[in-house]
Amino acid sequence: QVQLVESGGGLVQAGGSLRLSCAASRRTFSNYAMGWFRQAPGKEREFVAAISFNGGSTYYVDSVKGRFTISRDNAKNTVYLQMNSLKPQDTAAYSCAAAPNLAQILSHEANYWGQGTQVTVSS
């Protein structure tokens, strides 16, 4: 069992930045690919970014490319999402997820999910 706890959400003006963190409970964190997803009210959950177990590969949804950066620190069992140039359409609840491989993350078939942290971008 892997527990994931997100933090770092909040209210920010358009053009601002936030860094989300997702702390994992297990030392085997480095065995998992990780991803960030978001869900806005009334919309389906959307893939945002993913990173391989060693950080060597990253993937992003087109709408955040060049603005968001996913990274991980396996020594701290933590994955991050640096969000710059935020837009009102980025407003959503952001959740992290863990899976044995990237294919599962990219298919929204993660084994473990966090509870989420709210990001609100005002115009």
Image (cartoon, rainbow, N blue to C red):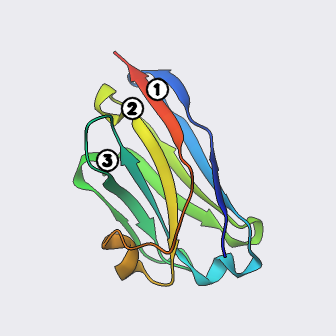
Q: Earlier in the sequence, mark 1 or mark 3?
A: 1
Mark 2: secondary structure: loop
Q: Amino acid at mark 1?
A: Gly
Residue 84, compared with residue 75, is above or below; it is: above
Which residue corresponds to the image point at 57% horizontal and 42% vertical from the top-left? 19
**Residue 86 circle label:** 2
Which residue corresponds to the image point at 34% horizontal and 35% vertical from the top-left? 90
Read off the residue under disc 1: 16
Q: Position of residue 109 (x, y in %)?
A: 38, 73
**Which corner quadrant holds the C terminus?**
top left
Mark 1, residues whose alpha carbon is within 10 Å: few (<14), some, or many (≥20)?
some
Quadrant in the picture for residue 72? bottom right
Q: In the depicted view, which residue is nearer to us: 22 or 108? A: 108
Could you tell whether 67 is left or right of 111 in the image?
Answer: left
Which residue corresponds to the image point at 39% horizontal and 37% vertical from the top-left? 92
Residue 11, compared with residue 3, is above or below; it is: above
Read off the residue under disc 3: 64
Mark 3: secondary structure: helix
Q: Position of residue 122 (x, y in %)?
A: 39, 17
**Which corner quadrant holds the N terminus?**
bottom right
Q: Are marks 3 and 2 in contact (CB under 8 Å)?
A: no
Q: CA distance from mark 1 to mark 3?
A: 14 Å
Could you tell whether 99 is left or right of 44 in the image?
Answer: right
Which residue corresponds to the image point at 70% horizontal and 81% vertical from the top-left? 28
Q: Are marks 2 and 1 in contact (CB under 8 Å)?
A: yes
Q: Amino acid at mark 2?
A: Leu
